[in-house]
Image (cartoon, rainbow, N blue to C red):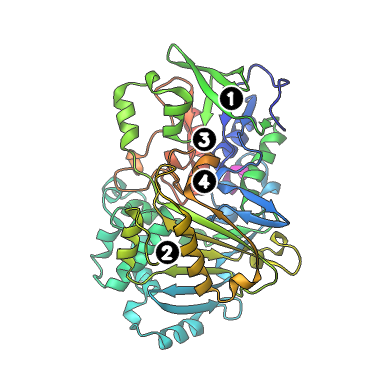
Amino acid sequence: MKFNSALSEKYDVIIIGSGCGGSAAAALASFNGYRTLLLEKNNLVGGRACTRDIQGFKLDHGHIVLRGDKGPHALVLKSIKCEDLIPKYALLKDLSYRTMFLGQVWEHSKQSDKRGFRSLRRNIQRSTLSIAEIPALALLSVQLKLRAIRENDNWKGLDRVSARSLLLEYTDNEVIDIGLAALTCGCFGVLSDQASCGEWIRTTQDIIRDDSVGYPVNGEGISAIPNSLLRAAERYGATIALEAPVERVVVKQGAVRGVSVGGKLVRSDIVISNAGIKETAFHLVGRSYFDQTYIEYLEKLSYSSGAISLGYALDRPIVDFHVGFKVPSAFYRNIRDSYDGRLPEQTMMVLICTSNIDPLLAPRGKQVLLVTAHCPAVRAGKIDWSPWIESVKRQVEEFVPGLSRHTIFCQATSPDALARENGRILGDAMGVAQTVEQVGELTPPSASPIKGLYQVGADVCSKGVGTEMATQSAIDLFNFLA
């Protein structure tokens, strides 16, 4: 529904934003008997897990890692007796891949070769690398050691150690080092010398244990996740208002009194913001309501990298893989150029042909290809993204020869556009970074210094990857409020 004056003047809980954190909070709040209102400023739900329909092609914002029916999205729905709303998933372990790693191309189809040994052997034989230099094999040996670490071990100490420092205890091989750095960049948006070892262990253990990472296949793209959570919220009586931008969070005498939306005060003693921890404090509330110590703490938070997203609508199927990866040659030089705001010669990219996974995402006989390329997270207007976008397009054409001849349109989303659409200060892809200074006990808190004001979203959680962190933050918050 769209915001209108028919909304009630008072709710038990008001939630700002329909990203995975806000949608999960709405589901949990309404199930627990709170009279719940969720306000979304855009005309589509999902935030950074939004899927747009353009000329019949359904295009996700980017690539989302999900543990299917075993991750936090499903956990919320199971806990509120809405198992029937959990989307079906295609598991990534059953899909085909094309990888360009440091200039070498590896292809692997697990549909035709379930155990993968024959295709892996062929890749090794064609490669100029020795077996010891194959990142997947080396990292597997490390992962086996990590699995032996129990949850009652000293997580605090592990959180303060970088993932790279742990790897260097096993090997200083340059290729393996780059493999881990590329993985932490893709999962956490930071290099392995910044990414928390403890967080890397926890995430790796969850993925290995659950063996259920996948992509929803119900025709909704990645928006199936927030959609399912909001359907659950509405089932328990929540009100969902679209095109309802919150102008400010109203605070009096150190406590929340509601929000101003459409020039009207909608009252509530509890406001849960999915707008971002800095964005909520600096823009929706105002710096003057917080002490200087809290303001300085927020200003020092570091964020994940940004992302350039390309959505290709193709006139016929030309992509034969499901998922593609490119880790460029001269990796560290290129990635550090990118972090420093200089256009790199080559860019790390993830490609996913979503219509090969779910044919309902493209018109019959056509195809969708999504590309996410690494770039810095900066304030809007600081970088001209046009050369970056053109560079990524050229590299995608190298990865998929002939792509441009079959492109009906290419929808490009820059970090600036991502920030505008989601009300972010920076064009970050994931939120507050999972670095050694910002995970575990040092994760930014959900509870703000203002009574009744809480945060959800990836900014205030360090458990998992991307949207899973956002949904987990809502679970953690309601466990705290219980």
For mark 3, give the secondary structure. Answer: loop
Q: Earlier in the sequence, mark 4 or mark 2?
A: 2
Mark 1 burial class by Cα count in 10 Å: few <14, some 14-19, many 20+: many
What whole-number distance in Å separates the C-alpha atoms at marks 1 and 2?
41 Å
Task: Name the residue at 30% across, 64% down.
Answer: 333
At label 3, the amino acid type is: Asn
Q: How far across and how far down the image is residue 360, in percent?
A: 72, 61
Task: Name the residue at 43% across, 51% down.
Answer: 384
Q: Nearer the viewer, mark 1 or mark 4?
A: 4
Position of residue 200 relative to residue 25, above or below, is: below
Mark 4 burial class by Cα count in 10 Å: few <14, some 14-19, many 20+: many
Q: Nearer the viewer, residue 229 or 373?
A: 373
Mark 3 burial class by Cα count in 10 Å: few <14, some 14-19, many 20+: many
Q: How many marks?
A: 4
**Residue 209 in view, yes or no:** no
Task: Name the residue at 59% across, 42% down.
Answer: 76
What whole-number distance in Å separates the C-alpha atoms at marks 3 and 2?
29 Å
What whole-number distance in Å separates the C-alpha atoms at marks 4 and 2?
19 Å
Q: Residue furthest bottom?
A: 125
Mark 2 burial class by Cα count in 10 Å: few <14, some 14-19, many 20+: many
For mark 4, give the secondary structure. Answer: helix
* Image: magenta residue range: 74-78
Q: Nearer the viewer, residue 301 or 406?
A: 406
Q: Earlier in the sequence, mark 3 or mark 2?
A: 3
Q: What residue did someone put label 2 on?
A: 348
Q: What residue did someone put label 1 on?
A: 13
